[in-house]
Image (tube, rainbow, N blue to C red):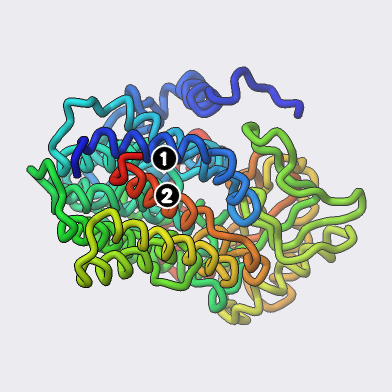
Amino acid sequence: MKKLINKVDNIVDEMLDGMTAAYPQYVKRLEGFNVLVRAKGATPKVALVSGGGSGHEPSHGGFVGRGMLDGAVAGEVFTSPTPDQVYEAVKAVNGGKGVLLVIKNYTGDVMNFEMAEEMAADDGITVEHVVVADDVAVENSTWTTGRRGIAGTVLVHKIAGACAESGAELSEVKRVAEKVIANVRSMGMAVNACTVPAAGKPSFELAGDEIEIGIGIHGEPGTHREKISDVNNIADKLLEKIFAEGIYAKGDEVAVLVNGMGGTPLMELLVANKHVKEVVEGKGLKVAKTIVGNYMTSLDMEGFSVTLLKLDDELKKYLDAPADTPAFVQF
Amino acid sequence: MQGGIYKCLSMIAERITANKDFLTELDREIGDSDHGINMARGFQAVMEKLSPDDTDIGATLKKTGMTLLSKVGGASGPLYGTAYMEAGKITAGKTELTPEDMKAVLEAAIAGIQKRGKAVRGEKTMLDAIIPAAETFSAKIAEGSDMAGALEAACESAKEGVEYTKTIIATKGRASYLGERSIGHQDPGATSAMITLEAIRDFMKGA
């Protein structure tokens, strides 16, 4: 394993200090906790907290700032943060109008965040949560754990964050977040697996000409393997599964997110995006917004995911609203 | 429960630590290969927090639960943390447990795990070891068995429960992504639950 690290055990701690060193105008770290909050402290609006295992940078700390998150909790690499950490984040960001937790759908994440919610409720803080489950590679009907939360989570941060920033009440912010979740779908693939630092070897092995379709963001194997082909052909397969959901129809406006897994050059993501736009428009949909880049990564995994979000006037308004965070800036 | 709750928890910690690599290996096959590592880290922190002066069973179990909750992470942290905390609630102020108390402890732990994990029996989880064990324990004390005898039988049921997890598909947790490929593997959580029950049994026997 070749990695730019010091001690494996210190990666998360050093990464968080690196974040505050790079972006002191945006974020500060809660003393003694793996939590990043806005540099200026709690605001008198509904606060948004997200988080999960580390290794998905810039998620979630990179989205702490005006128009998106108020706090982000970082667990060990690919391991959910514990309830006490989430609880500290909730207490720190609560400005009196309540807190919305944005959770990716994994058994551990849901349990730990729900426990934090109960702890905060005991303190009289109003907390609600939403669970993002946008990965169409996992069949919802077969597995009761349900679909995984992946790149679509970033769009929940953006839109619910803008809604909160507008001064909306907690119930309203939650409703908008749930509307995003109902209309967002993603699917990913890998050219090469990631290497978890503590494990020291790739989470799965692919032959030189093989790719894995339907991967998650923790090095979990996908739905199947096949020979590598043109990126247009690969993007078609991802889009085919997304369109099979039946929620995107001719005439709809959509946002497109072409997300890098961490190890793929932006050049390749842009090539993929060219085709994604052509296919989506070819089906009679309008691409109202496109985001391309590394937003929900899986360490050094090579690959990408495609996300579509069906928009209405309300979602569009919040998607286009300003945001000022380390990893997403929009005027 | 003579000899104290501290000694009992020490024995659980010892057994979990001794099985750290075994539990991690089971998890490597169908999960994310950290169960033994996480549980051992949790119980190491528990032993740092507890002292032989801890005699209030409820308070000690609560402290154990809180520590596991903040140190284990993943899904096992909230599940075991909740189990110990719920067991602590119904034993507050006690320094000894009757068989009836022990029955209530097992039932409270199960209720806590079910509430937190939203799982039922037969989903390839720790419940597949604990529920049959608790049922056997209750049946035995109803027949007039003493604590040691009832725990002995309960551990047999836990073991059968672990074996049973090899035959079923996981529908909870990360193993559920594997679908049918999870068959043939025993559940790491059911295994650590069985190890816990065996430690309690051996403590009661004075082993």
Q: Is residue B172 visible?
A: no
Q: Which residue is mark 2?
A: B76
Foreground of the two, A164 or A245: A245
Query: Residue B127 location, x and y as percent?
Result: 40, 64
Query: Residue A70 location, x and y as percent?
Result: 35, 40
Q: Amino acid at mark 1?
A: Val
Callout count: 2
What residue is shown at x 49% (from left), y 72% (from top)?
Answer: A144
Q: Which residue is mark 1?
A: B72
Q: Amino acid at mark 2?
A: Ser
The answer to which image quadrant residue A215 occupies is: bottom right
Q: Is residue A88 visible?
A: yes
Q: Which mark is residue B201?
A: none
Secondary structure found at label 1: loop
The chain containing the residue under callout 1 comes to B
Query: Residue A330 location, x and y as percent?
Result: 50, 43
The chain containing the residue under callout 2 comes to B
